Amino acid sequence: MSERLRPRDVALLAEESPSAPMHNATVEIFDPGQSGFDYPELVRLVQERLSFVPRYRQRVQTVPGHLANPVWVDDAHFDLGYHVRRSALPRPGTLDQLRELVARIVSRPLDRNRPLWEIYFVEGLAEGRVALLSKSHQVLVDGMHTVDLGQVLLDKSAEPKELGTDEWRARSSPSPLTLMAGAVRDSLTDRGTVAATARTTTGSVLRGIAGAARSAGHVVDALANRTSSTGSPIIGPLSQQRRVVAVRTDLADHRKVREAHGGTVNDVILATITGALRAWLLARDESMHGIHEVRAVVPISVIDDEMEATSLGSQIAAHFVDLPVREASPVVRLHQVSYSFLAHKETGRAVAASRLTSISGFAPATFHAIGSRVAARERRSYELNVTNVPGPQAPLYAAGARMLETYPVPPLLEGHPLAIGVTSYDGHVYYGITADRDMLPDADLLGPCIKEALDELVDSATGGRTRAPRGRRRRKAETTEKGRR
């Protein structure tokens, strides 16, 4: 019998729009070395590993009359070549060119008539490197029934695993009559199906009303030439285009700050983001228009909580923190962020990074996806979504090619034109920033601002100069922007 979508999954599909596609993405850069890792090898690898994630061969099938929630059915016309695609940059491709390509690809929604995922093999990077860009819809990766495909493509050893041939055959798709009969049967025998359908129907009506209100509000605001009533520069309507920013930093620098000032690496990361937002806001305007804090949601792993459960032995819950962007001192910013997590740590429910990464089958991409699901549920309660996932500190491989870098590309939710994902891996911390291309045309400045904010914290930890004069920082940002133009 086909598995029925849960109410939250149906809600995610209903909330998706051309300006807010609900998929997570990850960019990974590999050194093929002597492995021979190329597009045909990737196709072979994906075909071999798909048996571990059978949902990646299924599509969403609605029930006639919406008598019950949609179901997952095998895609009888599954075409691996459609999902595993080939692209290239003009040699020698740079990280900036890769970012532009990624931004265009993640701006496009996935096809609802097919399994909800894509992988791009990008050739042409400098030094013979290649990149993988993976897109998976949030309803596909729930961490319980399905993990991210990237989780099963990577190995801990350069020696590829031989798993044998895949004998998958699509089960026949249910007819409309069968779907209707199944909906009636489930409604009569399972009270949960009735409740789920009722919640979904009610939610759809409410979302339709809310969507119409948002559309009307956008028209009125446009006619009145008004900006967002919140006064926040990172709250506003989305376009259909994205910007992607990628920043590579050293994990040793974050640990150095932690050792000098206490707290955790997570605290240092959030303090770095706070400092970057502050510098970015100052570079945009002489004043910050009364902005003192930026309300952020930071999905965190907890123990024994009735939240978004995963099959990896942990649950994900929303934690809200006010990032003190008005504070001038990087050390004070760090202590304020650290204090906001103190109460959570004292409950004994917090999951340490070392424990998280030791979970069998753990993969950052899956936890980023679950974190985005949690953030989507709370989107009216914050301005910025930050998903920070500790990754393995030993190299990983795909078909013998070593993964050098990995950048999360978090989705944007309606009304939230900025999102930040962070992954630590093999001695580095990778910041991935997604921004609306029209709403935040200067989002590229956040890249150098991240590095500058971390440098401030490192200087404070080593007794060096902690801050550059404000005018110098602003002139540096303006010079960078002029050079980019």
Image: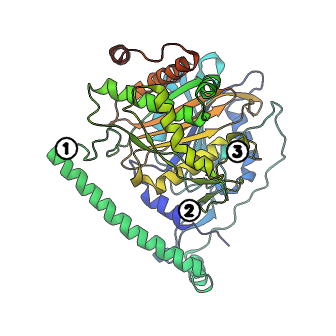
Q: Compute the Cα span from label 2 to label 1.
A: 40 Å
Quarter of the image with the C terminus in it: top left
Q: List the single residue furthest toward the bottom.
A: 188
Q: Which residue is mark 3?
A: 356
Observer-nearest of 458 and 87: 458
Observer-nearest of 447 and 262: 262
Q: Quadrant of residue 431?
A: top right
Residue 177 visible to the viewer: no
Q: Examine the rendered structure and indicate whether residue 262 appears above or below residue 256.
A: below
Residue 283 visible to the viewer: yes
Q: Residues within 10 Å of mark 3 (few under 14, many from 20)?
A: many
Q: Compute the Cα span from label 1 to label 3.
A: 45 Å
Q: Quadrant of residue 36?
A: top right
- Amino acid on which disc 2 is placed: Val
Closer to the eye: label 2 or 3: 3
Closer to the N terminus: mark 1 or mark 3? 1
